[in-house]
Image (spheres, grey):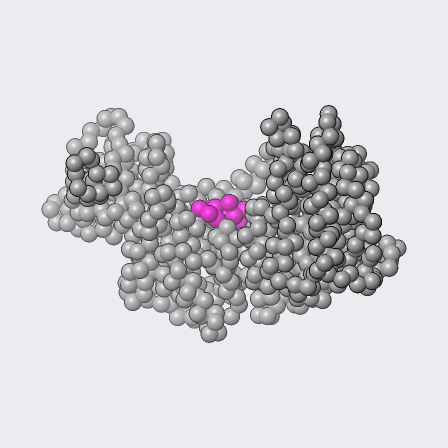
Amino acid sequence: MKVAREFFRNVKELPRDELLAPGSPLCAGCGALAALRLMLKVIDEHVVVVNAAGCLTLLAVYPYTPLRASWLYTTMGSAAAGAQGIRDALDVLIARGRLPAAEDLKVIVLAGDGSTLDIGLSSLSGAIHRSLDFWYLCYDNEAYGNTGFQMSSASPFGSQTATTRPAAGRPAGTLQHKKDIFAIWLAHKPPYMATVSTADPVDFADKVRRAGPLRGPKLFTALTACPPGWGHDPDQGAHILKLALTTGLWPLKEAVHGRVRHTYVPDHRRPVEEYLATQRRFEHLFRPVRQEEVLRAIQEEVDRYWEDVARHEICKE
Amino acid sequence: MLTGNAAAAWGARLADVDYVPAFPITPQTEIIEQLAAWFADGTLSGRFVTLDSEHSMITAAGAAAATGCRVFTATSSQGLVYGLEALYSVAGWRVPLVLVNVSRGLSAPITLEPDHNDILATRDCGCVQMHAETCQEVLDSVLIGYRIAEDPRVLLPVLVNMDGFSLSFTREPVTVPSPEQVQRFLPHYQPRHAEFRASRPMAQGVAVLGGAVYSHFRYQAHLAVQSALAVHAEAAAAFAETCGRTYDAVERFQLDDAEFVLVMIGSFATRARAAIERFRSEGQRVGLLRLRLVRPWPAAAIAGALAGRRAVAVIDQNLSPGQGGILFQEVAGTLVSQSDRPAVLRSFVGGLGGKEISLGEFRHVVASLERARPGEGPEGPELLFTAADRQQVQALGKIASPQKGETP
């Protein structure tokens, strides 16, 4: 069940403009790049991307940038503060008559899950609290991807990372459960926030367009495939992200001024195993022996989530 | 009469700053409280924003400067080292701003009173670093700081340092320049740096691959900080012309005929002046060399001022454990290749965590210089710590961990 599309009916209606040129040192099949490409298409050309240390920091390597937009690399822990400085400066310069309004820019933070959920959480929380008028895209590949896929607080229970390899004393791999950044953002009551996926580009684009007119923080988190970290062929990313939606593992939802609705509710959820079996990071759950308890726990967590959704929320057709 | 904190705020006000990102920390708070009030009542236009940490604060300061605003901010101690990563980044962006640091000893143990380990931790960032001795110099240095920071030959953050308590909370007579004087010395900001705007996309702070490119940019920062020596001299001359007060990279006090020279930075140099007046009245030829600029390092001025002296003592108000006084190392490095260098160079560490440097301690320093002989080999660093200091610490130590049979 999907909510009615507001701005785009199908992929053919998505903007044709490319603000991100091909050619970058990123890995083949990088899902984060696809998410950024789609988001920039819908937002605008007049953008400054404020980046936190992560995989996409390698987009702009001297003297090249694949962006038609501006770019500022900050630190891993303070990209949102960088956005604050630029936004405030543009406002002040325009108000004081030193910059024509036509020179204004939209400010968008581009950060991975490690920056967003861990080291940059305080900086981001502060920017949302201050009602900063900015965009935020978290590309969530569920680990510190750029450094070789170590566990972050976005790594899901039962996954393998470079620092949570399954071992005799810890056969499940990662024992922690993924931090719920959506709930953390929601507690700040921003005007707009959403989970998105390039596996449903029309939903993604609709959300970006819907957020556009709202003043204040507009926050997006996208599940993004990471072929080397997740352990799959680069051409399988789209298929795997689709499974994340149909198994119910990655719910698509949004909150406008704190009111949550799901934009896609899978009618018949596929078993999570179908998703897990596509990636080497979950291989230990199946081989050499099936870890029934872990698999059951993952399935039950997803089931519980959707039971709660059904209880608390009516999905509008 | 203004405190050092009020003087810093007046400096920012007179510079007509556009943007002040802030985060409170003792003993800096009065600066940002005053500026917040001036932005609120319309005295200053632009924006004052309280950030969530100094790390965020310095990032926002740099980002706003990269967008074309004149930016001021202030911090102290833990805050400065918390923001250290961002300070390196902002210096690498080559953006102008002025940051006032109110020096305070670093934790642990946590304390409120001043020493210079905080500001010297930023020594290698690629920022200009000025040290004020008086409240007047704080205000003037903020104004001079913008001239240096915004000069196309420099384009870097300028850090103005004052000591906590002994300047931050101490009222001194301060002449506040008129807005007209300041306007002549420091016109409204016209950024000449690339700034973010819709019609001119640019990538700033981008990654580099390979040491050659990194070396190039890092060395550019070195050359830019070095350029600040000449730029400071020009700015100080223009300042003297408009506002009537003169500043040099180093300040020489009673140096002309001095046999013995004390080298210091910051407000504790005022204590040294008083001691030197006393020693002079007793017939000893002692002088003071106060370093106002620490970055760029005024090597030629230091070498010139110390040439041919009988003995020199560097009194560091900082400690690099396992090595000693930081500025001693730098002075020694400057003098080592000078043929007419002083015969003796001694290292003293004093005033840590705001500990008083008494007349008796200065007397001990000078007596040590008198006794010292050329070629004596490495001596020190010697901690300036009196019998009374020891008694105090011992008394507290007994309370902290009483021995058997003792009542605390």
Q: Nearer the viewer, residue B9 or B40?
A: B40
Residue A273 lies, in percent from the top left, at 77, 38
Task: Say whether residue B62 is visible.
Answer: no
Q: Residue furthest bottom?
A: B41
Residue B326 lies, in percent from the top left, at 35, 38
Residue B93 lies, in percent from the top left, at 56, 49
Give the residue displayed 51% in from the left and 56% down from the top. B52
Classify A209 as above or below B202.
below
Magenta segment, which residues?
Answer: B81-90
Quarter of image, res B107 = top left
Residue B218 lies, in percent from the top left, at 54, 40
Number of on-image labels: 0
Give the residue displayed 69% in from the left and 40% down from the top. A297
Classify A294 as above or below A16.
above
**Which quadrant of the figure contains the N terminus of chain A?**
bottom right
Residue B83 drawn in magenta: yes
Q: Nearer the viewer, residue B159 or A118?
A: A118
Classify A180 as above or below A90.
above
Give the residue displayed 42% in from the left and 43% down from the top. B121
Q: Nearer the viewer, residue B366 or B110?
A: B110
Residue B119 drawn in magenta: no
Q: Overall secondary structure of the magenta stretch?
A: helix
Task: Say whether residue A111 is visible.
Answer: yes
Give the residue displayed 75% in from the left and 35% down from the top. A279
Q: Is residue B207 left or right of residue A28?
A: left
Q: Is residue A78 left or right of residue B138?
A: right
**Which quadrant of the figure contains the C terminus of chain A?**
bottom right
